[in-house]
Amino acid sequence: MKHLMSPLDLSVEELDRLLDLANDIEANPSRYSHSCEGKKLATLFYEPSTRTRLSFEAAMLNLGGSVLGFSSADSSSAAKGESVSDTIRIISCYADICAMRHPKEGAPLVASMKSSIPVINAGDGGHQHPTQTLTDLLTIRSLKGKLGDFTIGLCGDLKFGRTVHSLIQALIRYPNIHFVLISPEELRIPDNIRDEVLIKNHQDFREEVRLEDAIPELDLLYMTRVQKERFFNEEDYIRMKDFYILDKEKMKLAREDMLVLHPLPRVNEISTEVDDDPRAVYFKQAQYGVYVRMALILTLLEVEVC
Protein backbone atom coordinates (compact mmCIF):
# COMPACT_ATOMS: atom_id res chain seq x y z
CA MET A 1 0.00 0.00 0.00
CA LYS A 2 1.31 3.43 -0.93
CA HIS A 3 0.52 6.89 0.49
CA LEU A 4 1.30 10.36 -0.87
CA MET A 5 2.77 12.76 1.67
CA SER A 6 5.16 14.67 -0.60
CA PRO A 7 5.73 15.02 -4.35
CA LEU A 8 9.07 13.30 -3.69
CA ASP A 9 7.21 10.12 -2.76
CA LEU A 10 6.94 9.62 -6.53
CA SER A 11 10.03 9.03 -8.63
CA VAL A 12 10.35 11.04 -11.84
CA GLU A 13 9.33 7.93 -13.78
CA GLU A 14 6.25 7.38 -11.58
CA LEU A 15 5.37 11.04 -11.89
CA ASP A 16 5.61 10.89 -15.68
CA ARG A 17 3.28 7.88 -15.74
CA LEU A 18 0.82 9.69 -13.46
CA LEU A 19 0.81 12.79 -15.68
CA ASP A 20 0.41 10.63 -18.79
CA LEU A 21 -2.61 9.00 -17.15
CA ALA A 22 -4.07 12.42 -16.26
CA ASN A 23 -3.69 13.55 -19.88
CA ASP A 24 -5.44 10.39 -21.07
CA ILE A 25 -8.27 11.01 -18.60
CA GLU A 26 -8.61 14.53 -20.02
CA ALA A 27 -8.76 13.17 -23.57
CA ASN A 28 -10.99 10.15 -22.84
CA PRO A 29 -13.13 10.86 -19.75
CA SER A 30 -15.80 8.27 -20.58
CA ARG A 31 -13.20 5.51 -20.52
CA TYR A 32 -12.70 6.09 -16.79
CA SER A 33 -16.25 6.96 -15.72
CA HIS A 34 -16.96 3.60 -14.03
CA SER A 35 -13.46 2.59 -12.96
CA CYS A 36 -14.04 3.21 -9.21
CA GLU A 37 -17.57 1.91 -8.87
CA GLY A 38 -18.05 0.55 -5.35
CA LYS A 39 -15.04 2.52 -4.03
CA LYS A 40 -15.30 5.27 -1.40
CA LEU A 41 -13.11 8.32 -0.84
CA ALA A 42 -13.05 9.91 2.64
CA THR A 43 -12.24 13.63 2.67
CA LEU A 44 -11.00 14.60 6.14
CA PHE A 45 -10.60 18.37 6.07
CA TYR A 46 -9.67 19.87 9.43
CA GLU A 47 -9.42 23.39 7.94
CA PRO A 48 -11.43 25.21 5.26
CA SER A 49 -10.96 24.39 1.60
CA THR A 50 -12.96 24.86 -1.56
CA ARG A 51 -10.86 23.84 -4.56
CA THR A 52 -8.89 20.98 -3.02
CA ARG A 53 -11.81 19.31 -1.25
CA LEU A 54 -14.28 19.73 -4.11
CA SER A 55 -11.75 18.69 -6.75
CA PHE A 56 -11.07 15.47 -4.81
CA GLU A 57 -14.79 14.87 -4.57
CA ALA A 58 -15.31 15.65 -8.26
CA ALA A 59 -12.43 13.33 -9.14
CA MET A 60 -13.92 10.38 -7.27
CA LEU A 61 -17.43 11.03 -8.58
CA ASN A 62 -16.07 11.27 -12.14
CA LEU A 63 -14.54 7.82 -11.61
CA GLY A 64 -17.90 6.40 -10.56
CA GLY A 65 -17.06 6.18 -6.86
CA SER A 66 -18.64 7.85 -3.85
CA VAL A 67 -17.49 10.30 -1.18
CA LEU A 68 -17.89 10.73 2.58
CA GLY A 69 -16.16 12.93 5.11
CA PHE A 70 -16.20 16.30 6.84
CA SER A 71 -15.20 19.85 5.85
CA SER A 72 -14.04 21.26 9.19
CA ALA A 73 -12.69 20.03 12.50
CA ASP A 74 -15.76 21.47 14.25
CA SER A 75 -18.00 19.02 12.42
CA SER A 76 -15.88 15.99 13.34
CA SER A 77 -15.03 14.15 16.55
CA ALA A 78 -11.83 16.21 16.68
CA ALA A 79 -14.05 18.77 18.43
CA LYS A 80 -14.46 16.17 21.18
CA GLY A 81 -10.72 15.60 21.39
CA GLU A 82 -10.37 12.54 19.17
CA SER A 83 -6.84 12.06 17.86
CA VAL A 84 -5.88 11.86 14.18
CA SER A 85 -4.64 8.31 14.80
CA ASP A 86 -8.01 7.17 16.14
CA THR A 87 -9.94 8.99 13.42
CA ILE A 88 -8.01 7.30 10.60
CA ARG A 89 -8.45 3.88 12.21
CA ILE A 90 -12.21 4.43 12.15
CA ILE A 91 -12.25 5.91 8.63
CA SER A 92 -10.26 2.88 7.41
CA CYS A 93 -13.34 0.80 8.26
CA TYR A 94 -15.58 2.98 6.09
CA ALA A 95 -13.59 4.00 3.01
CA ASP A 96 -11.02 2.71 0.51
CA ILE A 97 -8.85 5.83 0.30
CA CYS A 98 -8.52 9.08 2.24
CA ALA A 99 -7.54 12.68 1.50
CA MET A 100 -6.59 14.66 4.62
CA ARG A 101 -5.98 18.37 5.13
CA HIS A 102 -4.77 19.49 8.54
CA PRO A 103 -3.35 22.74 9.98
CA LYS A 104 -0.59 20.85 11.81
CA GLU A 105 2.50 19.85 9.86
CA GLY A 106 2.93 16.09 9.77
CA ALA A 107 -0.64 15.17 10.74
CA PRO A 108 -1.34 13.27 7.48
CA LEU A 109 1.96 11.41 7.97
CA VAL A 110 0.85 10.34 11.45
CA ALA A 111 -2.45 9.19 9.95
CA SER A 112 -0.67 7.17 7.25
CA MET A 113 1.27 5.24 9.91
CA LYS A 114 -1.98 4.04 11.51
CA SER A 115 -4.07 3.65 8.37
CA SER A 116 -5.03 0.49 6.54
CA ILE A 117 -6.04 2.50 3.43
CA PRO A 118 -3.98 4.87 1.25
CA VAL A 119 -3.73 8.40 2.69
CA ILE A 120 -3.19 11.49 0.53
CA ASN A 121 -1.80 14.64 2.11
CA ALA A 122 -4.19 17.39 0.92
CA GLY A 123 -2.15 20.09 2.70
CA ASP A 124 -0.54 20.17 6.16
CA GLY A 125 0.04 23.62 7.63
CA GLY A 126 2.80 25.52 5.83
CA HIS A 127 4.60 22.29 5.01
CA GLN A 128 3.47 20.39 1.89
CA HIS A 129 0.65 20.38 -0.65
CA PRO A 130 1.63 17.54 -3.00
CA THR A 131 -1.57 17.29 -5.07
CA GLN A 132 -1.38 21.02 -5.85
CA THR A 133 2.18 20.39 -7.01
CA LEU A 134 0.99 17.54 -9.24
CA THR A 135 -1.61 19.93 -10.62
CA ASP A 136 1.07 22.56 -11.26
CA LEU A 137 3.34 20.06 -13.02
CA LEU A 138 0.50 18.79 -15.21
CA THR A 139 -0.44 22.37 -16.13
CA ILE A 140 3.14 23.30 -17.03
CA ARG A 141 3.81 20.11 -19.00
CA SER A 142 0.49 20.25 -20.85
CA LEU A 143 0.77 23.93 -21.83
CA LYS A 144 4.54 24.25 -22.27
CA GLY A 145 5.08 20.77 -23.68
CA LYS A 146 7.76 19.75 -21.20
CA LEU A 147 9.09 20.01 -17.67
CA GLY A 148 12.48 21.69 -17.71
CA ASP A 149 14.40 24.39 -19.59
CA PHE A 150 12.51 27.39 -18.24
CA THR A 151 12.72 30.30 -15.82
CA ILE A 152 9.96 30.43 -13.21
CA GLY A 153 9.16 33.31 -10.90
CA LEU A 154 7.57 32.43 -7.56
CA CYS A 155 5.92 35.55 -6.19
CA GLY A 156 4.27 36.52 -2.90
CA ASP A 157 4.22 34.55 0.34
CA LEU A 158 7.23 32.28 -0.03
CA LYS A 159 7.64 31.85 3.73
CA PHE A 160 4.33 30.17 4.58
CA GLY A 161 3.29 29.09 1.07
CA ARG A 162 3.26 25.29 1.17
CA THR A 163 2.44 25.16 -2.57
CA VAL A 164 5.71 26.99 -3.29
CA HIS A 165 7.76 24.71 -1.03
CA SER A 166 6.34 21.57 -2.66
CA LEU A 167 6.77 22.93 -6.19
CA ILE A 168 10.42 23.84 -5.65
CA GLN A 169 11.17 20.37 -4.30
CA ALA A 170 9.51 18.76 -7.31
CA LEU A 171 11.04 21.00 -9.99
CA ILE A 172 14.67 20.66 -8.93
CA ARG A 173 14.57 17.12 -10.34
CA TYR A 174 14.16 18.49 -13.88
CA PRO A 175 16.93 19.99 -16.05
CA ASN A 176 17.86 23.62 -16.58
CA ILE A 177 15.28 25.30 -14.34
CA HIS A 178 16.02 28.77 -13.01
CA PHE A 179 14.10 30.11 -10.01
CA VAL A 180 13.44 33.79 -9.33
CA LEU A 181 12.10 34.14 -5.78
CA ILE A 182 10.06 37.35 -5.54
CA SER A 183 8.97 38.43 -2.07
CA PRO A 184 9.33 41.11 0.58
CA GLU A 185 12.05 40.49 3.15
CA GLU A 186 9.51 39.33 5.74
CA LEU A 187 8.11 36.60 3.47
CA ARG A 188 11.30 35.22 1.96
CA ILE A 189 11.75 31.51 1.36
CA PRO A 190 12.50 29.64 4.63
CA ASP A 191 16.11 28.77 5.38
CA ASN A 192 15.45 25.04 5.22
CA ILE A 193 14.19 25.31 1.62
CA ARG A 194 16.99 27.69 0.62
CA ASP A 195 19.78 25.69 2.28
CA GLU A 196 18.62 22.08 2.14
CA VAL A 197 16.80 22.11 -1.20
CA LEU A 198 18.15 24.87 -3.43
CA ILE A 199 21.75 25.34 -2.30
CA LYS A 200 22.37 21.70 -1.39
CA ASN A 201 21.26 20.64 -4.88
CA HIS A 202 23.31 23.39 -6.59
CA GLN A 203 20.10 24.86 -7.99
CA ASP A 204 20.24 28.17 -9.84
CA PHE A 205 18.14 30.82 -8.07
CA ARG A 206 18.10 34.46 -7.08
CA GLU A 207 15.89 36.61 -4.88
CA GLU A 208 14.11 39.81 -5.89
CA VAL A 209 11.79 42.22 -4.12
CA ARG A 210 10.23 44.00 -7.13
CA LEU A 211 8.06 41.97 -9.49
CA GLU A 212 8.73 44.51 -12.26
CA ASP A 213 12.44 43.70 -12.15
CA ALA A 214 11.86 39.99 -12.70
CA ILE A 215 8.86 39.61 -14.96
CA PRO A 216 10.50 40.38 -18.36
CA GLU A 217 12.69 37.25 -18.19
CA LEU A 218 10.10 34.74 -16.96
CA ASP A 219 8.60 31.82 -18.86
CA LEU A 220 6.24 31.13 -15.93
CA LEU A 221 4.96 33.35 -13.13
CA TYR A 222 3.53 31.54 -10.12
CA MET A 223 1.57 34.02 -8.00
CA THR A 224 0.53 33.28 -4.42
CA ARG A 225 -1.68 35.04 -1.94
CA VAL A 226 -0.52 36.34 1.41
CA GLN A 227 -2.27 33.90 3.76
CA LYS A 228 -4.05 35.61 6.63
CA GLU A 229 -4.43 32.32 8.49
CA ARG A 230 -0.64 31.88 8.74
CA PHE A 231 0.00 35.25 10.43
CA PHE A 232 0.22 35.66 14.18
CA ASN A 233 -1.16 39.21 14.15
CA GLU A 234 -3.44 41.12 11.81
CA GLU A 235 -1.22 44.19 11.64
CA ASP A 236 1.54 42.25 9.85
CA TYR A 237 -0.99 40.70 7.48
CA ILE A 238 -2.52 44.07 6.53
CA ARG A 239 0.94 45.49 5.86
CA MET A 240 1.88 42.59 3.56
CA LYS A 241 -1.35 41.61 1.81
CA ASP A 242 -1.20 44.08 -1.10
CA PHE A 243 2.58 44.05 -1.57
CA TYR A 244 2.18 42.52 -5.05
CA ILE A 245 -0.69 43.10 -7.45
CA LEU A 246 -0.37 41.73 -10.97
CA ASP A 247 -2.26 43.99 -13.37
CA LYS A 248 -2.34 44.84 -17.11
CA GLU A 249 0.53 47.29 -16.80
CA LYS A 250 2.85 44.68 -15.32
CA MET A 251 1.69 42.11 -17.89
CA LYS A 252 2.92 44.48 -20.63
CA LEU A 253 6.44 43.83 -19.33
CA ALA A 254 6.08 40.07 -19.74
CA ARG A 255 6.87 37.82 -22.68
CA GLU A 256 4.06 36.98 -25.07
CA ASP A 257 4.26 33.30 -24.15
CA MET A 258 4.68 33.69 -20.38
CA LEU A 259 2.05 31.77 -18.40
CA VAL A 260 0.54 32.98 -15.13
CA LEU A 261 -0.32 30.28 -12.59
CA HIS A 262 -1.92 30.58 -9.17
CA PRO A 263 -2.98 27.81 -6.74
CA LEU A 264 -6.07 29.87 -5.78
CA PRO A 265 -7.93 31.30 -3.99
CA ARG A 266 -6.73 34.75 -4.93
CA VAL A 267 -7.47 37.89 -2.96
CA ASN A 268 -5.95 41.05 -4.46
CA GLU A 269 -2.69 39.74 -5.89
CA ILE A 270 -4.05 39.30 -9.45
CA SER A 271 -6.35 41.98 -10.79
CA THR A 272 -9.48 40.61 -12.45
CA GLU A 273 -8.50 42.58 -15.57
CA VAL A 274 -5.78 39.97 -16.13
CA ASP A 275 -8.32 37.13 -16.35
CA ASP A 276 -9.00 37.73 -20.05
CA ASP A 277 -5.31 37.64 -20.96
CA PRO A 278 -4.64 34.32 -22.76
CA ARG A 279 -1.48 33.96 -20.66
CA ALA A 280 -3.59 33.69 -17.48
CA VAL A 281 -4.13 29.95 -17.02
CA TYR A 282 -5.06 29.67 -13.34
CA PHE A 283 -8.66 28.62 -13.98
CA LYS A 284 -7.49 26.02 -16.49
CA GLN A 285 -5.01 24.96 -13.82
CA ALA A 286 -7.92 24.23 -11.47
CA GLN A 287 -9.44 21.92 -14.09
CA TYR A 288 -6.16 20.07 -14.45
CA GLY A 289 -6.37 19.51 -10.69
CA VAL A 290 -9.38 17.23 -11.17
CA TYR A 291 -7.62 15.14 -13.84
CA VAL A 292 -4.48 14.67 -11.78
CA ARG A 293 -6.42 13.70 -8.65
CA MET A 294 -8.39 11.18 -10.70
CA ALA A 295 -5.09 9.73 -11.89
CA LEU A 296 -3.72 9.66 -8.34
CA ILE A 297 -6.79 7.87 -6.95
CA LEU A 298 -6.54 5.22 -9.68
CA THR A 299 -2.81 4.81 -9.07
CA LEU A 300 -3.01 4.47 -5.27
CA LEU A 301 -5.99 2.09 -5.49
CA GLU A 302 -4.09 0.14 -8.18
CA VAL A 303 -7.08 0.24 -10.51
CA GLU A 304 -6.26 -0.82 -14.04
CA VAL A 305 -8.53 0.52 -16.76
CA CYS A 306 -8.76 -1.62 -19.87
Image: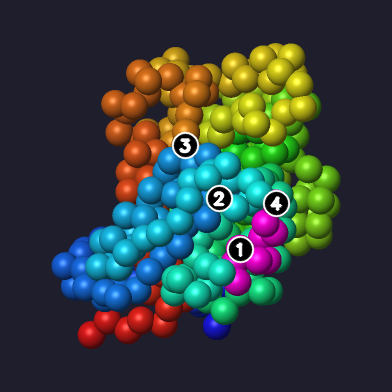
How many discs mark residues in the rendered view?
4
- Can you tell which of label 3 and label 1 is closer to the viewer? 1
Spatial CA span between label 4 and label 3: 31 Å
Query: Which SS does the magenta portion mostly show?
Result: helix
C-beta proximity under 8 Å, tags 3 and 2 = no
Span of residues in magenta: 81-89
Residue 86 seen in render: yes
- What amino acid type should be assigned to the residue bearing mark 4? Gly
- Can you tell which of label 3 and label 2 is closer to the viewer? 2
- In primary-sequence order, the first of circles 4 and 3 is 4
Q: Which mark is residue 264?
A: 3
Residue displayed at 45% across by 56% down = 69
Could you tell me which secondary element the residue under label 4 belongs to? Answer: loop
Q: Is residue 20 above or below residue 82?
A: below
Q: Quick check: is 88 in the magenta stretch?
A: yes
Q: Position of residue 182 (x, y in %)?
A: 66, 32
Q: Quick check: is 295 in the magenta stretch?
A: no
C-beta proximity under 8 Å, tags 2 and 4 = no
- The answer to whether 253 appears left or right of 172 in the picture is left
Q: How is the image coloured?
A: rainbow
- In primary-sequence order, the first of circles 2 and 1 is 2
Spatial CA span between label 2 and label 1: 9 Å
- In primary-sequence order, the first of circles 3 and 1 is 1
Residue assigned mark 1: 87
**Towards the viewer: 99 or 15:** 99
Residue displayed at 65% across by 22% down = 210
Could you tell me which secondary element the residue under label 3 belongs to? Answer: loop
Could you tell me which secondary element the residue under label 2 belongs to? Answer: loop
C-beta proximity under 8 Å, tags 2 and 1 = yes
